[in-house]
Image (spheres, rainbow, N blue to C red):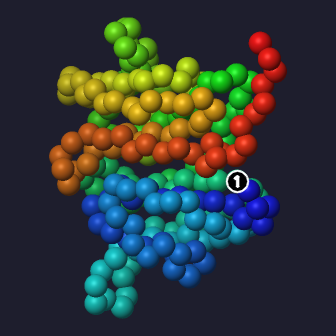
Amino acid sequence: MNNSFSYITYLNLTNQNFYISIDENISVKNILPYEFISYKKIFYGYHTLTGTFFTEGEEEVEPIFTKKLNIRPSASFVVVVSPLHNDATKFKCTVSEEKPNNFDQPNCQLRVGNFCDNIENLSLIYNKDEPTDFNLPAYTTIGSYYFLEPKKYKLKLSLKKGKDIILSLPKLKPFRAYSIFLVYNSIFDKYELNFNVDMPSYKTFPTLPPQ
C-alpha cells in the first residue's frame, strides 16, 4: 500500500441509498442497500465521516450518522451502517480496522459481523461433520479473526424463535482474510451473508519455509 493512503469500504444495511461525506466533502455519491462498494483511498489522520440518505430534490437533509475517525497509515477499514434494531428508525455506524494475524501456514482467516438482532447461536459446518460452535459477536459488532482450513463451509444460524437457517460460504482460499456480515434483508424478507475479501488479502503472500 502507498504509505500516504489507507483504504476504506462501506456496507449499507439500511433500506435506502445514502451518500458519504468525509470532512464535508462528498466521497461516495450513492451506496445501494445491502451492498459493499469497492475500496476507496483515504488520507491517514483524523476525519469526520457523515452519512446522509439520498433524496432527490431536497437541499437540506438531516444526516443519519456522524462519526469521527482516526485513520492509521497503510491500513484498511470497513464501515457498516445499520439500524439499531431490525425495525428501528435510528442508525449506527460501525467502524472496524482489518487487522488479521500473520500467516505461518497456508490457512485462511475469518471473522463475523453480527447485524441481525435475533440470532441466538452460530455454528460452522463442513461437509457432513457435526456443526462446530462459532463465536457470535454482540449485535452491531464485528468479532476477531479466526484461523480456518481453506475449505467449503456452511453457517448455521440458530434464531431466538427456534428456527435454523443454513447459509453457504464461497470456498475459502489460503492466505486470505475474510469478513462475513450476518444480515436480515427486510426488502426481500430473508437472512443473508454479506461476504468480503479484506484488503490485507491483496498484499504479497508470505513465503513459508519448506516442509
> What is the quadrant of residue 163 in the picture?
top left
Task: Name the quadrant of the C terminus.
Answer: top right
Q: Examine the rendering and report whether any part of residue 36 can be seen.
A: yes
The residue positioned farthest toward the left in the image shown: 189
Q: Examine the rendering and report whether any part of residue 120 can be seen.
A: no
Query: Residue 123: x and y, percent?
Result: 39, 21
Residue at image mark 1: 75
Front residue of this view, candidates 211 and 203: 211
Front residue of this view, candidates 33 and 142: 33
Which residue is drawn at the image coordinates 76% and 61% (left, top)? 2
The residue positioned farthest toward the front in the image shown: 210
Q: What residue type is labelled 1?
A: Ala
> What is the quadrant of residue 11 in the picture?
bottom left
Task: Name the quadrant of the N terminus.
Answer: bottom right
Q: In this view, does 56 lie above or below 1?
A: below
Figure disc tally: 1
Could you classify mark 1 by the number of other residues whose Cα lies within 10 Å: few (under 14), some (14-19), or many (20 or more)?
many
Q: In this view, does 31 lie above or below 205?
A: below
Query: Residue 60: x and y, percent?
Result: 37, 88
Q: Is mark 1 on a helix, strand or loop?
A: loop
